[in-house]
Image (tube, grey):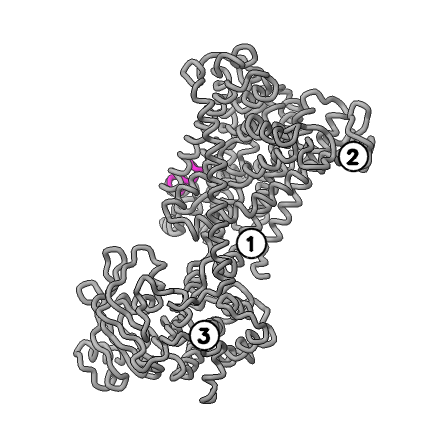
Amino acid sequence: MIPADSHTKSQPLSSTEMPPSIAVPTPLIQINKLSLHYGDRPAFRDVTLSIGTGGITALVGPSGCGKTSLLTALNRLTDLIPGCRVAGEIRMGNMDVLAPQTNVIHLRRLVGMIFQKPNPFPLSIRRNLEFPLREHGSRDREQIARTIETVLQDVGLWDEVKDRLDSPALALSGGQQQRLCIARALALSPAVLLMDEPCSALDPLSSGVVEDLILQLRGRYTVVIVTHNLAQARRIADEAAFFWVHDGAGRLIEAGTAQQFFEAPRDSLTAAYISGMRG
Amino acid sequence: MAETLNPRQDLREWLAFVLVWGAAAVVTAVFCWLLGDIVWNGLSRLSWTFLTAPPESAGRRGGIGPILVSTFLILGVCLSVSLPIGVGTAVLLAEFTSDQSLFGRMTRRSLDVLAGVPSIVFGLFGNAFFCKTLGLGFSILSGGLTLACMVLPILIRSTEEGFRAVPANYRLSAAALGLSRSTTLIHLLLPAAVPGLLVGLVLGIGRAIAETAALIFTSGYVDRMPESLLDSGRALSIHIFDLSMNVSGGDANAYASALVLVIMLLLINGTAAWLADRGLHRRIVTV
Amino acid sequence: MTSSHSNILCRWQTDDLLCWLLRGLAAIAGLVVVVIVGFLIAEALPVLSLIGLGRFFTDPSWHPAEGFYNLTPMLWGTLFAMAGSVLIATPLGILSAVFCHHYAPPAVARSYRRLIELLAGIPSVVYGFWGLVVLVPLIGDIHPPGPSLLAGILILTIMILPTITLMADASLANVPQHYLRGAAALGLPRWATIRGVVFPAAKSGLFTGVILETGRAIGETMAILMVCGNVVQTPSSLFDPIRTLTANIALEMAYALGDHRAALFVSGLVLMAMIVGLAIAAEWISRGRIYG
């Protein structure tokens, strides 16, 4: 649906604005001995994981094993949570994500995030896309209009909303809202997309549409997706990582390519979880 | 690290930061000035004799004993009338009327308007109705009744809030047990809604005790010790007004009276906040 | 939730007495406002039927003893004082609420909120007294006489500030957290988030706050009576003394008789009309234009 060369076209900002630090080979994200605590309560401990460029990495496991917490550590949304402590190391390209001197605004621009519940702002569809762009320094009206059209086409929403760009975003259906949120993230041309169960709050039909969309993003963005839906993980993921609660804290049990993970899991816990879900 | 905020945005963020902190600083400074001034000038006069002695030479000297008595009598009249009406209305609105019913909607709307009526208009009304039509004259009774009309909306709103904070399954389980409405209300809902009721009560007292304009031509100016509810009595707020506007050389006692009034209101509002934090999870905004 | 539980209770037919008692009490509460308006009209009627409403705006002056009843200067006084104070208090109040939610450290925000709540409870006569002994002499030093429109505006600003701050605070608190997280995830800085996301989301609450503070500014009597000088004139500068509608009632009610007294009830009616107008505006806003 999207031609192979659309990658360059969909970059609304010139490459000179892209920091040089991100243009690096695989793996893009290297997580080293990462632990996260909410006050005294651990969310996960000692996670070491590398995430390849341009692939879809699925984080799977039962509720409360720290998958979402891991995701929020990657763009430092953890800063917003009082009492939340993160220890260890995350490297994204050459950037030390957790270093205090790291510019979080810069970081979050490079790392888009999609939440479980679609969260378009209470503004018009157009303003939802235009406002973050303008805040990040785009002034050229035509350029902004072009970017809006491109990203809406990327998420397959253009034909549905092009005649009512000025109507409220909250009047869209759940699936449309979620695609608008993805478009909003894409408009800033991030390198990484974090998705926290992006389909779980949607009805099956919209969920399918969003899933197809994620597949189309493969190769153009590095996608890290948390999902409870093993079948979905199997359909879309290039790599998978399995988390489990151990001694009250989440642990990474096993990580590898999706094929190996689903066909021949090394760990017996993984095997049990996969077969349990299947049955 | 690369600079990502563009200069224009950077300037705006910085400006907003200065503006927000500046606004908070100005507001804090003005209010510290105001409170500091009242406390500083009022404290020297404040004593037990001041609180109990009668005023002399139009209030320039002496204390505020009879004035405090009148204030509390007015308050007593106000509460003994407004409390039953207010709680009854709140119970009806929260428990016995659906939000869509005409009666409920009309009552609510009329209370909303009542909450916005300027206090001086209450004064006009009180003068015409209680003093003239009912023939109560300038009296503590007239003043208290006028204030009762005034505090009704506050009282009803937070009591209703209290009832709405009671979980719905209380009512469901009571109905499932076959309890009657009055039993459910008295034994289950009323105790659970007490915090809201108390908050409303305390806020109502605060509003009543702070009121001046509605009392000038209902309870009157007389600063003698009242002998009955039909006597005219001067409320504390009117005393402050009279001392500062009509009595030259009354400032010192006006300061002390203002301090007494402020301390009373601090205690009242502190109690309300404490009750609200303890009993109600929702915050009640006083306006 | 509320409508469902009340239905469950109301299906019971055993406690009719209680239900009727409560209805009676609620009817009293609901009728108070009607009775108030009724009495205002009844008391104002003699002079209204004698000279008509028009002359309250076209008479040469306000001299009730000679039969001149022009309310316009006092109406201007009320409007100027209201407009000035609302213009100053609204930005200050909203910025104060923003301070509590997005800038101040939690402990500072808590004590700031306590301070504002405290101020909301201070009686108007105390504000007026402070204005009279502190503010008016200060203004008098800059530009005599001192009691003036400016003093009124400043005192009113201080008085209505807690109202708008607490309302804005409550409506900012109701902005869903996921908007803020979404904005942070897009790398938006603080003020950009507030301006672009928080204000639009809190818009209707903020407007309601402005309407409430406007109502307070119109209805305030004692403080403004104490600092404004009470000269019946349309002000030509900020330093001119003025008299508002409310102050006029408080000043003259004590000795007004006959038509004069009725004229004061007419000004009470004018005040009521303003308040009802505001209530309608508030209703219209809360009817929900969330987007714009």
| Location of residue A31 with respect to B224 vertically, above or below | below
Locate residue B186 relative to residue C196 in the image: left or right. left
Q: Which residue is mark 1?
A: C204
User: Above or below — where is B61 with respect to C98?
Assistant: above
| Secondary structure of the residue carrying numbered label 2 | helix
Please name the amino acid that badge 3 sits on: Glu
Q: Is residue A232 above or below residue C110?
A: below
Badge 3 marks a residue whose secondary structure is helix
- Along the line of sight, the residue nearer the viewer: B220 or B4: B4
The answer to which of A166 and A149 lies nearer the viewer is A149
Where is residue C36 shown, x and y percent of the image?
65, 34
Tag 2 and tag 3, C-beta contact below 8 Å: no
Q: Along the polypeptide, which appears first: circle 2 or circle 1?
A: 2
Residue at the spot 74% in from the left edge and 28% down from the top edge:
C262
Residue A40 inside the magenta-drawn segment: no
Label 2 neighbour load within 10 Å: few <14, some 14-19, many 20+? many
Assess whether residue B197 is covered by the magenta stretch.
yes
First to last magenta residue range: B189-199
Under mark 1, the amino acid is Ser
Residue A29: x percent and y percent? 30, 75
Q: Which mark is residue A17?
A: 3
Q: Residue furthest top?
A: B57
In depth, the one of C15 and A184 nearer the eye is A184
Q: Residues within 10 Å of mark 3 (few under 14, many from 20)?
A: few
Secondary structure under tag 1 reads: helix
Q: Residue at x 77, y 29 (%)?
A: C62
Residue located beneath label 2 in the image: C56
